[in-house]
Amino acid sequence: MNNQTIQWPSPAKLNLFLHIISQREDGYHNLQSVFQLLDYGDSLEVAVKQNDQIQFTCDKPELSNNDNLVVTAAIKLKQFAETQLNHTQLGAKIHLQKKLPAGGGLGGGSSNCATTLIALNHQWQLGLSLQQLADIGLSLGADVPIFVMGNTAFVEGIGEVLTPISLPETWYLVIQPPCHISTAKIFSNSLLTRNSKAIKIRDLNALELPYQGLNTMQTIACEQHPEVKQAIDWLKQFNQSARMTGSGSCVFAAFDNEQEMRKIATRCEWSHFVAKGVNQSPVHIRKLA
């Protein structure tokens, strides 16, 4: 095993649209969405240790504890390797550098999980396939498989049915309103639309992605958190397709012209970032380098 410290990207995602199709008997929701990966996100520094321990730190002290999903993912993979692959003495030191906000709808925690699985599989030399890692990741969160597989994709089921697609690598302005939205609270709201008509992948062109899209959670989020509506309304001055990603709170709009977008960003008083949409995850580009 290589004891070298390696830095791994942990990218954000945007939901270019999000439709809730139905609610399952187990309480989960069947959905359809397109997950657009970005070239912006958190990062993890990972080093292999021979002490059979997982050591975790984060640049945000409130996240630097063993309840973090990074630790959960590392322990899950370690247990799998020990019981299924007969590996022993698997330890690691992991440091998370956090940029993405919690409760922003950008998939930060799920992406952190996925990067942890990919990085440790590589550095522990376990030889697991991406599908095996995605199966492990699904037990940690419905959005983890998309980050493991590493492609912008049409997403179905609870988030585990993935069809890779290619989209124009356009630019996005992403605004972070000053609020935290609970995904569980949004999903449990009795007014949430749960019967959107299912579409086929061939119907995606009609949605005019990434420039148009409907998020069925947006209305409820705006009612409960006026800051989200204010951010959308501000961004709509420049782009009428401004909308919320995931269960919020972040909102975004797609732009063809990077220079124009960056000029608009300088006028934004909210916390924000600019990013390019990518069809392949930076994690996999890092692994191949």
Image: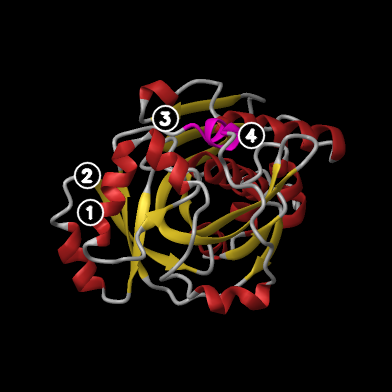
Identity, as a three-letter code, of the amino acid under mark 4: Ala
SS at mark 2 in the image: loop
N-terminal of the pair, mark 4 or mark 1, is 4
* Relative horizontal placement of residue 210, taking residue 271 as reference (left or right): right
N-terminal of the pair, mark 1 or mark 3, is 3
Identity, as a three-letter code, of the amino acid under mark 3: Cys
Q: Which residue is drawn at 67% across and 73% down?
A: 201
Residue denoted by label 4 = 74
Q: Does the magenta stretch include residue 185?
A: yes
Q: Residue at x 51, y 27 (%)?
A: 56
- Boundaries of the magenta span: 182-189
Residue at mark 4 to residue at mark 3: CA–CA distance:
15 Å
Q: Marks 2 and 3: in contact by CB < 8 Å?
A: no
N-terminal of the pair, mark 4 or mark 2, is 4
Residue at mark 3 to residue at mark 2: CA–CA distance:
24 Å
Identity, as a three-letter code, of the amino acid under mark 2: Trp
SS at mark 4 in the image: helix
Q: Which residue is drawn at 62% across and 55% down?
A: 146
Q: Is residue 135 magenta?
A: no
Q: Residue 167: x percent and y percent?
A: 50, 75
**Total marks drawn?**
4
Residue denoted by label 2 = 270
Disc 2 crowd rating (10 Å Cα; few below 14, some 14-19, many 20+) is some
